[in-house]
Amino acid sequence: MAELYRSDAVLLPTLSVPIADAPGEITEYFANLIKADPKIRMEESVKYSDCNLAYDVGRWVINANGQDAAARVTWVYRYEEGKWLIAHHHSSVNPQ
């Protein structure tokens, strides 16, 4: 998963506190998330792309360790050297 991110990408995760802004931190985030056996369901998604930039904004439900967390999510992608990479990923639990 971490290979889908630019080397300077920022990940603000849904289910953990620290911001991951280095490749090793993004790898560690996904290694820990996989242990929770996550199931993800997109509820709503709006996509846009233009030249070398794209984004996807929406709502999803993440089920990890048997618990649902409804969240908002944003991905920003950059097209470089023949591939799309994630430049920014922010997901936060919906406010009460």
Image (tube, grey):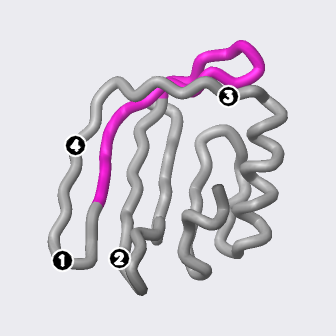
Task: From the image, state whether disc 2 or disc 4 is nearer to you.
Answer: 2
Mark 4, residue position: 46
Tag of residue 51: 1
Where residue 53 sits: x, y (%)? 27, 72
The residue that mark 3 highlights is 38
**What crowding class fits label 3: few (fewer than 14 Cα within 10 Å), some (14-19), or many (20 or more)?**
some
Q: Amino acid at mark 4?
A: Val
Look at the image and give the residue range highlighted in magenta: 55-70
Q: Nearer the viewer, mark 4 or mark 1?
A: 1
Secondary structure under tag 3 reads loop
Residue at the image position 47 percent from the left and 66 percent from the top: 86
Please check the rendered image and state whether residue 23 is part of the magenta-colored stretch, yes or no.
no
At label 1, the amino acid type is Cys
Q: Secondary structure at mark 1?
A: loop
CA distance for labels 2 and 1 = 8 Å
Between the residue at mark 4 and the residue at mark 3, the CA separation in whole angstroms equals 23 Å
- Mark closer to the chain start, 1 or 3: 3
Residue type pointed to by label 3: Pro
Looking at the picture, which amino acid does disc 2 mark?
Tyr
Residues tagged 4 and 3 counted as in contact (Cβ below 8 A): no
**Horizontal placement of 49 versus 13: left or right?**
left
Q: Is residue 18 left or right of residue 7?
A: right
Mark 3–mark 2 Cα distance, whole angstroms, equals 28 Å
Residue at 46 percent of width and 69 percent of height: 85
